Amino acid sequence: MNSPLGLFDSGVGGLTVLSRLLQRHTDVSCLYMADTARLPYGEKQPAEIREIAEEIVIWLSAQKVSAILMACNTTNSLGFDVVKKHSGVPVFGLISAAVDMIPEGKRIGVLATPATACSGAYGSEIKKLQPGAFVIEQACPAFVPLIEAGKVATEELRHEAIQYVQPLLEAQVEVVVLGCTHYPLIMPLLKQLFPANVLFVDPAVGLVKQADKILGEPKRKLRPIVSVSSSRFCVTSDPSGFADRATPWLGVRPEVQLVSLRSKACFF
Ligand code: DGL
């Protein structure tokens, strides 16, 4: 594999970014790193999240990736500067991509992990472009653990979701930003809980368009079904569990390799 694109997340959430990327750029080689040993990131303190971001970017750089797509909002909100500093290759983030996708003059709700919501990163980035914007950022602590546990279509998840969306409904938001890459995996549920005219923004859509800067404009139309045959998957714990969890979202069971982020060994 020559100079793959590097994507990283704590778990399966970043696969929503990988899928968007492969729908647009079908033939690109990717290295997907899921730091499953430390999932969920959203419960951690900012300093630890920044350390994690640094470790991952150093490891990805040692694998000679040609660019990094941050498929994780939590590290994006708290460690974008760290990743830029250590990467030595182009870095693309979700938050700036999302901000460009939000129409002006709308009331905006952001659903995110506790760390992302507490960082206020979405609010401050949105207000750079739209200074008077109304933005409400809502932490959703139960979502990532439940999604990773495969409890997507459960009453338990629905119960939690109802609590989280309530403040956004009361604030009469018109736009909902999916501020965690795991959340597109529960879109059917989220759609049920908001009025039909609410616009959902998946930052991955904008992120993969930004990647055109290095990959060029796509030659073909978007492909609804993606092939991950040119992608490699690495995790920091439980490769077979990750393969199980990834299978429904990828449509195939990926081969997954266990790696240590502290080892710089290049294994491709
Ligand atoms: N999917 C990631 C994000 O977008 C991380 C979620 C987590 O591990 O808490 O923030």
Image (cartoon, rainbow, N blue to C red):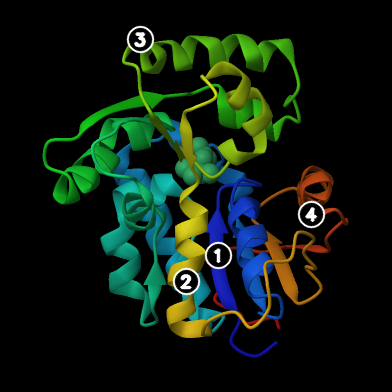
* Mark with earlier residue (3, 2): 2
The residue depicted at 39 percent of the width and 60 percent of the height is 93
Evaluate if marks 2 and 1 touch, with contact meaning CB atoms under 8 Å apart: yes
Q: Which mark is residue 68?
A: 2
Q: Which mark is residue 7?
A: 1
Q: Position of residue 111 (x, y in %)?
A: 43, 30
Q: Secondary structure at mark 1?
A: strand
The residue depicted at 46 percent of the width and 51 percent of the height is 203
Q: Residue furthest toward the left?
A: 131
Q: Residue furthest toward the front?
A: 197
Which numbered disc, 3 or 4, marks the residue closer to the eye?
A: 3
Task: Return the residue at label 3.
Answer: 170
227 to the left or right of 123: right
Which numbered disc, 4 or 1, marks the residue closer to the eye?
A: 4
Q: Position of residue 126 (x, y in %)?
A: 24, 45
Q: Secondary structure at mark 2?
A: strand
* Mark with earlier residue (4, 1): 1
Q: Quadrant of residue 84?
A: bottom left
